[in-house]
Amino acid sequence: MNTRSDYAANHLARALRAGSVGRDDALCLDLHDRGVTLDFGTVFAMAERYANALVAQGVAPGDRVMVQAEKSVEVLAVYLGTVLAGAAFVPLNTAYTARELEHFITDAEPALVVCDPAGEETVRGLATGAVLTVAADGTGTLAEAVARAAEGFDAVPRAADDLACILYTSGTTGRSKGAMLTHANLASNAETLSDYWRFTRDDVLIHALPIFHAHGLFVAANVSLNAGNAMIFLPKFDPDTILSLMPRATSMMGVPTFYTRLLARPGLKEASAAMRLFVSGSAPLLAETHRAWTAATGHNILERYGMTETAMNTSNPYDGERRPGTVGFALPDIEIRVTDPETGAALGADEIGGIEVRGPNVFTGYWRMPEKTAEEFRADGFFITGDLGTISEDGYVTIVGRSKDLIISGGYNIYPKEIEGLIDDLPGVIESAVFGVPHPDFGEGVVAAVVSGPDGSVQGEAIRAALSDQLAKFKQPKAVVILDDLPRNTMGKVQKNVLRETYADILSG
Ligand code: MCA
Ligand code: AMP
């Protein structure tokens, strides 16, 4: 076994190995559902063997390795193996349908796609490169390829600005854009966060997030690997399992839905007594949830703010006031400013404007979309997040809304344009408007307002049925209302705020 710790500076692999150098026997992963634990030496030996397997499949430095498969240690090993091989890791939400998958494969042109055995036929019909399968229990042709691969792998040298990952994020145009994240982006954010949140090798993190998005992969997993702490690696979020595991953990990261669901369970106070840290992000944590959690457990949730394009930007402090309703301070080496969205002029304390960010965490641009990239950066290098907010006199950032037409449901982003495009193409539909309203469990839920043609033939149920194999489940409207007209302002623009107000209670009943 040749698990290296001498990776080049700025190589993401170095940041991910930093906390476990010389500690190969220390616990890395507790695979609770399989009843198996793995130490760091085993996980990195696995990563090296996976890197050899990828290379044997024809993956070269700079190539993309795409994964759409259930969360497992094998998928984590594909991530680490891809990083070692100098290729770019491209994870996809398991909920995406074949229609959505087609865009990602065509756009990223992966040298290898790793998918669930159930999706193999579809992927083979779309992919031009190699295809391997992995099921939730680790079986599949990936395991066979790894069994044939050699042990030991020297990380392929990479420059700080070389691509480490592409994460797809939906866009206002309806077309998903691939955010290109470099070795330096991800390495710097992992190091910053593990210091800021005081992760040490003694921590045990409950990891119940998916690993196809920034939160579960670049925050939870990268921070733990950087700090050298153990993760209890769960296939999905289940509140009862988490409560039963809390007494042997120190920390958890989650979206607000995790916290509201856990609050509804008995035994939370006792279970969480010895926990050190609860982190929330990906969607707004209501100040009332923050306060309810403190009242129930005695712990103040630490809320932070990030994006696929930037990893994490701000965080409430570890020591000091974790102010409910705010996302805290700009992280070290990261600059945050609030500007007038029209002119770009910087605004003063407490003035509402567009949030912009600059720092080592900020991505290099959208994959093969130079014009789109240029539109979202200022000339001085600040990235325009599309979030609206304020910065207080004492430096706390508060997000008050979004200039982008975005719905965040249970921590997943949904762009209305994509759904409107599909509904508008259905027979009998004149036009549609998709918007978010409060949802008791997911924070926001998707609603579609649809204008039917003169024969009035369009039915809500038929629309939901027509979308069912077109869109990932979390994007599908949870309610459809049929209207004669959409509300418009004098400029003819659809007033989504009016729709949001009118149907504010439609999902809360
Ligand atoms: C599941 N459903 C959803 C969602 N999840 N609908 C809307 N929004 C969702 N998020 C659907 C299911 O398909 C199902 O439909 C019904 O809702 C109920 O599902 P349920 O069993 O309750 O869902 P679950 O499997 O328990 O999942 C809920 C969840 C999950 C645990 C909150 O959505 C989740 O893990 N979310 C985390 C997302 C995340 O990691 N985001 C980070 C993005 P039906 O009943 O019709 O079958 S990274 C990011 O945003 C940035 C960088 C950041 O700052 O972190
Ligand atoms: P994504 O594109 O999935 O990376 O989602 C990024 C978006 O999630 C941000 O632009 C924000 O709108 C939102 N977001 C992330 N963290 C928070 C938070 N703590 N509070 C409010 N919104 C958040």
Image (tube, grey):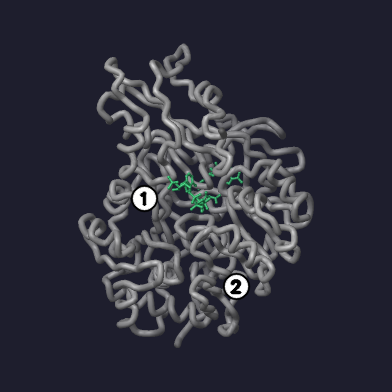
Residue type at mark 2: give it: Ala
Determine whether 464 is above or below 412 in the image: above
Asked whether the viewer can see residue 356, the reply is no
Q: Secondary structure at mark 1?
A: loop
Return the residue nearer the eye: 151 or 338.
151
Label number found at residue 313: none
The residue pinned by badge 1 equals 96
Judge from the rendering whether residue 463 lies leftward or rightward of residue 130; answer left or right.
right
Residue 11 is situated, as x and y percent measured from the top left of the image, at 49, 69
Residue 116 is situated, as x and y percent measured from the top left of the image, at 33, 63
Going 49% across and 74% down the picture, which residue do you hit?
Answer: 34
Label number found at residue 230: 2
Q: Residues within 10 Å of mark 2 (few under 14, many from 20)?
A: many
Return the residue nearer the eye: 55 or 433.
433
Q: Gap between marks 2 and 1, in whole Å?
A: 30 Å
What quarter of the picture does the C terminus occupy? top right
